[in-house]
């Protein structure tokens, strides 16, 4: 169908270049402001309207450019905080994600011209929803700004995640945007009644159903007879100090966490702790290969009388004389046991930051990504077990100490005799398993399939450990924290989040955040973990909805491409 026929069918002159540029810019602003720090989540319900309106009468090439530009700018302004870490990685990630969206613009244009019976709003919603989901697939996926995450603070709308996950929330918002865009287009060429009554009413009805359904789904946290009592530690260590050589060798990190463990034990009082959660890489060494710091950490574990989940790094070797493998890791420690009960190596590494694409020896990006950690991928997702805490171990009598007569002070620097081997430890007793939990390190929390895998295997709650101090006072710590809300609602499980410099918090199974900490502060959060309220429909069918969208999108792309080829063939005949 040529442009003249298309314009005649629409009955309105297509938008010019400058109005389209203005619409794309408006849409980008609405999208970014819908996420923290601004966090005006209502704007996300209209953020795609300008793009859908601007894309209505475009050629495939124009469609690609508009959608690519829109997504690229959303990424640039949405996760600008990545640039100080790795500018090349930041730009490459933004371009890669935008390429997926550009493909959506191409297919939408082809469908508009060659599948005229398919309503435009359906094609537009399908194109955005499918390409958004593609961004979460594969090792180098990075679905950070999926539009469903914008609703983390919209307690009613976010309940949709229990049915279809975060991409179900996205689907609702995308459909709403597409319906509003249809109403705007009809308003351009018809009376407001004919535009707003069918299309505006449909959009309003969709929003009302979602929010009313969320209201009916809300519940209150419930507790087992013996809830797990946990402490979430936030060291508040600035990133420029955390890996400074003098800071590591002085043991200042461990003095901070000794103080925090003592503070947590003191605040818990007679209600013994069962679990202490340290942030990502809080033990800033290869903990299991550094006896000095391992002894010190085991001393804290013995003193508290409960299990500790400690973020650290791990070094493994492949056979005799093999190359070392470097992992972002966490270990579960218990009193009186010199070895880790369980360990986890991070599986989903951040592209261009924690791993170099196309292999560790890739020359293509190696010189560009000097600050990339280049970890190895983990391969196991164990469930960690929590048993009843034994209560804090008594410290030696004051006269047994060296240079300090205060028995309540717990500092291994000031009391060198308080090593893990010398601390009194309660007799080992295999207590009952109170709960099992799954672990997500840092950006792994943005991948819903990982949380889903844990809860399907029986996890009673999820733990997220992270170090967002890299990003200082930017939007990143707030954006990242709100992702935990979706992980909680999807499976109706609590989520506990320990961040080195904030935001630490815990989320109940309905997505309410509790005890949020401030950035760049030292803090301890105590929580009696509520029981899980699942299973949910999402745990049963998982990401069936976005997969269906993706399948329909592929079929639409193929059909539209074939029809376009056939039309061009007929046009060339004499």
Image (spheres, rainbow, N blue to C red):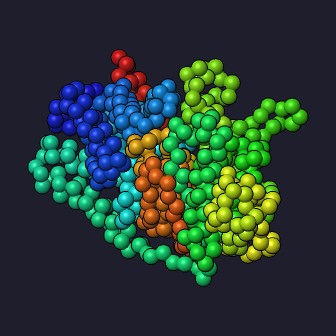
Q: In this rendering, is residue 506 above or below 291?
A: below
Foreground of the two, 303 or 524 = 303
Q: Is residue 5 left or right of residue 567?
A: left
Foreground of the two, 538 or 157 = 157
Q: Is residue 10 left or right of residue 319?
A: left
Which residue is at 25% across, 38% downward?
Answer: 26
Q: Is residue 238 left or right of residue 75?
A: right
Which residue is at 63% across, 70% downward?
Answer: 273
Residue 62 pos. (x, y %): 33, 27
Q: In this rendering, is residue 397 above or below 555?
A: below
In this orientation, does residue 558 appear?
A: yes
Q: Quadrant of the C terminus?
A: top left
Which residue is at 56% across, 34% downward?
Answer: 353
Residue 370 pos. (x, y %): 58, 25
Q: In this rendering, is residue 373 above or below 124?
A: above
Residue 23 pos. (x, y %): 24, 36
In this orientation, does residue 122 appear?
A: no
Foreground of the two, 166 or 310 = 310
Q: Quadrant of the N terminus?
A: top left
Residue 390 pos. (x, y %): 71, 73
Foreground of the two, 75 or 195 = 75
Point out the residue furthest to the left here. 191
Q: In this rendering, is residue 108 above or below 551?
A: above
């Amino acid at each position: 169908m040529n442009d003249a026929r298309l314009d005649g069918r629409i009955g309105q002159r297509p938008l010019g270049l400058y109005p389209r540029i203005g619409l794309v810019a408006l849409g980008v602003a609405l999208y970014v402001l819908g996420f923290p720090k601004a966090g005006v989540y209502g704007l996300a319900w209209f953020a795609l309207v300008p793009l859908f309106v601007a894309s209505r009468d475009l050629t495939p090439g124009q469609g690609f450019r508009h959608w690519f530009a829109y997504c690229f700018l959303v990424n640039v302004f949405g996760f600008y905080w990545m640039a100080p870490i790795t500018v090349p990685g930041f730009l490459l990630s933004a371009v890669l994600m935008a390429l997926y969206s550009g493909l959506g613009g191409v297919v939408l244009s082809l469908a508009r011209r060659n599948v005229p019976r398919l309503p435009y709003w359906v094609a537009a919603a399908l194109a955005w929803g499918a390409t958004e989901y593609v961004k979460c697939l594969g090792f180098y996926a990075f679905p950070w700004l999926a539009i469903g995450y914008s609703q983390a603070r919209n307690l009613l709308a976010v309940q949709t995640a229990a049915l279809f996950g975060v991409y179900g929330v996205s689907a609702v918002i995308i459909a709403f945007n597409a319906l509003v865009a249809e109403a705007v287009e009809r308003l351009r060429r018809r009376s407001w009644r004919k535009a707003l009554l069918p299309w505006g009413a449909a959009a309003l009805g969709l929003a009302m159903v979602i929010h009313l359904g969320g209201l009916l789904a809300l519940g209150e946290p419930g507790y087992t007879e013996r809830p797990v009592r946990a402490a979430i530690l936030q060291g508040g260590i600035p990133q420029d100090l955390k890996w400074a050589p003098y800071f590591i060798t002085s043991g200042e990190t461990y003095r901070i966490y000794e103080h925090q463990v003592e503070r947590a034990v003191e605040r818990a009082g007679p209600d013994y702790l069962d679990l202490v959660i340290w942030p990502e890489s809080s033990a800033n060494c290869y903990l299991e290969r550094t006896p000095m710091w391992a002894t010190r950490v085991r001393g804290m574990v013995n003193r508290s009388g409960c299990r500790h989940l400690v973020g650290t790094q791990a070094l493994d070797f492949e056979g005799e004389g093999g190359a070392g493998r470097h992992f972002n890791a966490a270990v579960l420690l218990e009193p009186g046991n010199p070895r880790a009960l369980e360990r986890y190596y991070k599986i989903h590494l951040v592209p261009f930051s924690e791993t170099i694409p196309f292999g560790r020896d890739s020359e293509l990006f190696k010189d560009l990504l000097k600050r990339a950690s280049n970890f190895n991928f983990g391969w196991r997702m164990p469930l960690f077990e929590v048993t009843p805490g034994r209560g804090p171990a008594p410290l030696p009598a004051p006269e047994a100490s060296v240079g300090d007569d205060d028995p309540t002070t717990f500092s291994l620097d000031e009391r060198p005799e308080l090593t893990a081997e010398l601390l009194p430890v309660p007799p080992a007793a295999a207590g009952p398993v109170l709960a099992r939990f799954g672990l997500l390190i840092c950006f792994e929390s943005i991948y819903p399939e990982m949380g889903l895998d844990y809860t399907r295997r029986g996890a009673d709650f999820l733990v997220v450990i992270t170090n967002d101090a890299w990003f200082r006072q930017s939007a990143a710590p707030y954006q990242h924290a709100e992702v935990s809300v979706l992980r909680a609602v999807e499976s109706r499980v609590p989520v506990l989040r320990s961040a080195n410099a904030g935001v630490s918090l815990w989320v109940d199974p309905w997505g309410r955040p509790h005890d949020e900490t401030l950035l760049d502060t030292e803090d301890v959060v105590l929580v009696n973990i509520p029981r899980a309220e699942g299973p949910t429909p999402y745990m049963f069918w998982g990401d069936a909805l976005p997969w269906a969208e993706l399948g329909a999108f592929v079929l639409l792309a193929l059909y539209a491409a074939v029809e376009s080829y056939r039309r061009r063939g007929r046009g060339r005949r004499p």
